[in-house]
Structures are given as C-alpha cells and as structure tokens.
Image (spheres, rainbow, N blue to C red):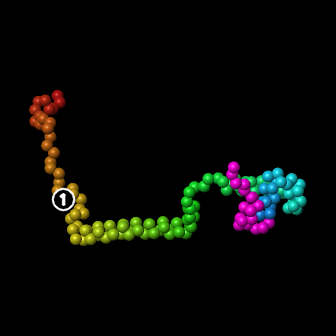
Amino acid sequence: MGRTVNAGRLVTTMDAMNEAKRQLMTILDVLAGKLTITEACERLGVSKATFHRMRDQALQGALDGLVPQPAGRPAKPVDPKDQKIQVLEERIADLGVELEAERARTIVALVKPELLKDRSEKKSPPPMISNSSPEPPRGGSDSRPS
C-alpha cells in the first residue's frame, strides 16, 4: 500500500500568501469530504457563489498547470527596434557589396575600356552564304511581261 499524502503540509510549504493557502486548504477539505460547502463558506467568510467561483478557479489553475508544455525555455520576444536594426544592418551589408562591385567596374572601365565594349562592335559577323540557286538573268524573254 502506498504512502498517504498530507495535503495540509504540501500546501503550507508552497510559495504563496497565507490567505491563498488557507483558501486552497479549505477547497481541498471540501473536495475530500471533510467540510461541507456551507462550513467552508463560514470559514472563509464568503458566499456560496464566491466559493464555487474560487473552487472552479483553483481546479482550472490545477488543470492548466498539468497541460504539457513545449520543452525548453520559451523564445525570447523580439523587440521591434532590434528587428529594424537587424534589417538595416543587412541592407548596409548588401549595399557594401554593391559598392565594391561598382568600384571594380569603374576600375575596369578606366584601365581596360575595350573589355566593356559590345562584342558586335569589335568584329562584324561573316557574310551569309546562301544555299539557294542563283536568280535567272534579267532581260530574257521570260522576264518581261507581254
């Protein structure tokens, strides 16, 4: 047989205000059948409606505490200012790369401008050779209408 648990001792060791501990002990006593709701209301000095609300909140809090949570520490919320700073820093880095590329193009243009000319300007394409038969000579009898 297992060991019995003393709810009163568990509650008194919890980190909470004394009044909250007293309320929880009273709610547990009602749930265990040690007190009636009327006796609990007298002990706490509250109405039955208030006791039922307190009991429901305590039970809901217990259930919420038992819901599985993702493992690990919750993600740190990102400050919108920090997010903007990060976006701007990334943009500055991108602009730095673009600036260096433009500097390189400028140096090439100054040192070797011929590299930047269009290749079609350097040499013209070879003449096209036609595979079709040559045209008939003009001035023959077939070339003029009658």
Q: Amino acid at mark 1?
A: Lys
Q: Quadrant of residue 28?
A: bottom right
Q: Position of residue 121 (x, y in %)?
A: 21, 58
| Residue situated in front as seen by the camera: 88 or 5 | 5
Does the magenta segment cover residue 7? yes
Query: Which quadrant of the rendered structure holds the C terminus?
Result: top left
Q: Is residue 13 above or below residue 48?
A: below
Image side of residue 101 versus residue 4, left or right: left
Q: Position of residue 139 (x, y in %)?
A: 11, 35
The residue most toward the top is 146
Question: Which stretch is magenta?
Answer: 1-20
Q: Is residue 42 above or below residue 131?
A: below
Q: Which residue is mark 1?
A: 122
Q: Is residue 135 above or below residue 109?
A: above
Q: Is residue 18 visible?
A: yes
Does the magenta segment cover residue 69? no
Q: Residue at x 76, y 68 (%)?
A: 17
Counting the numbered discs, the total is 1
Q: Residue at x 72, y 56 (%)?
A: 5
| Residue situated in front as seen by the camera: 110 or 124 | 110
Q: Is residue 49 visible?
A: no
Q: Residue at x 43, y 69 (%)?
A: 92
Q: Residue at x 55, y 69 (%)?
A: 81
Q: Quadrant of residue 3?
A: bottom right
Image side of residue 138 versus residue 11, left or right: left
Q: Quadrant of residue 41?
A: bottom right
